[in-house]
Image (cartoon, rainbow, N blue to C red):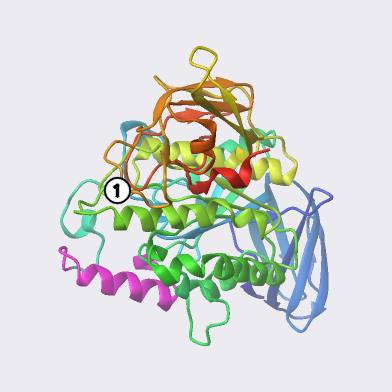
Amino acid sequence: MNLLYGLNDNALLQRDNDNMCACTFGAECKGELVSSLGLVERIGEDAYTLCGMPAGGPYEVTLSDDEDSVKLTLWVGDIWLLGGQSNMEGSGRFREKDMREDEDPNPAIRAYYSDNRWGAAVHMLHEPWISVDDCQREFWRNNQINSPWKSDQPEFISHGVAKRGIGPGVFFARKLYELTGGVPQALVPCALGGSGMFRWNPDAKEDNLYHAMVRRVKRVGGKVRGLFWYQGCNECYDDGIEKLHYRMARMIDCLRRECKDDKLPVVQVQIAKNNIPTRTLDVGFRWERLREKQRTLGQYVPYLDTVAAIDSSYSDLIHISADSQENVGLRGALSMAALCGFGGALSPKLSSMEMRWDECIPFRAVLVVHFENASNLMSYGAPLGFSITETPEEEIINPTMRIARIAFEGDAALIYTELSQEALAGCYLHYGYANMGHCNIVDKNGHSLLAMGPVCIADYLK
């Protein structure tokens, strides 16, 4: 007997809607193939399905044909694809607790690593230097050789520096394990640092990261539960911003067709800001426009939620810290659980605005900004993050200019200004203006407000 794809020792199999496994696999067999647990059914030449094992594990399973048998250890639960670029790949610096957790990982939280190896999920999930997919391994290798490291090995091996590689994936899976009441979880890392959307183009004839991701879906049994996505920094140029909605919608649509699930849930992380020094705000405005495209993607793609990273701390000028990666992973899990019906909570979404007069200074306007999926808005310290500009890309030195204070009322943020209502109605609202400002507003679930802007206030007034 020779197992070809879809079924491997130590694997986790995706559960179906009836909470039983539903795995498609390939095998070269002699005669009839049977399993000691579950039911094997032949569906084509060298193609089979394995079903009937409930969520849980580990199970000791023996597959037998007329001449041979194979013993496997299997789990049944949920499989999640991890896609995008370097912040999903992980650039957070290892903390003491991360190293301790890696020494004793939860065996019910699995990972299908880049070399087609199943194992317990540990923090450096992405290892492109060992990938079996050329499009991933060679792209990473070329970038590394042309970097200051000048090596085809990761720097912690080639130069003996401390490990970096904390992404949101393990935190995401742990939270889903908790929210599902202990259903085993698995991660399939597919992200690659520096990869623009053209490398995830499903219509490309040449081999690319999208095609590699689809191959990995087949290798884990043909079914996954959803996609957790963190990408966008490479799209912060005019054409990339303009075409983001189309490119993301096209990729998601094709992936759903490949997975035979037109409701495959997707959670994306909205990019934060960069701290690269520039003399103008042009770069910041491009990042802001890209975030606005991400914020509004859910209007065009169903079964998608977007979570924020705008309140992150940093590991370097672009990559967020391990602490913030943990926050992003937890937020992603809350949103994914809500999309899947496991509980959780969707992130707050801008819904409408209204204007009031300041109760103490009646000729000054208060902008009341309402959010869906939000209650008990709060902040760590004085609320910060909102900006008001007179034009979409007005350059202001102080991001809190025109704002006296911010307060909260149920699902709303109250922005006290020193403008008249007429003047305010002609302005634009931002949360996370350009690359400036500090954002610290969250809801009771720990979701941050999404970065927004420039948003025309008049378009949202009730």
| 398 relative position to 412: left or right | left
- Judging depth in this view, the residue of 65 and 333 nearest the camera is 333
Query: Amino acid type of disc 1?
Result: Arg
| 285 relative position to 245: left or right | left
Residue placed at 82% from the left, 75% from the top?
42
Q: Which residues are magenta?
A: 127-150
- Judging depth in this view, the residue of 100 and 243 nearest the camera is 243
Q: Is residue 313 above or below residue 226?
A: above
Q: What secondary structure do most residues of the magenta stretch adopt?
A: helix
Q: Is residue 16 above or below residue 461?
A: below
> x and y percent of residue 174 in the render?
55, 38
Q: Is residue 417 above or below residue 29?
A: above
The part of the image, by quadrant, that contains residue 4 is bottom right
Residue placed at 41% from the left, 41% from the top?
432
Residue placed at 68% from the left, 44% from the top?
57
Query: In the image, is residue 149 part of the stretch drawn in magenta?
Result: yes
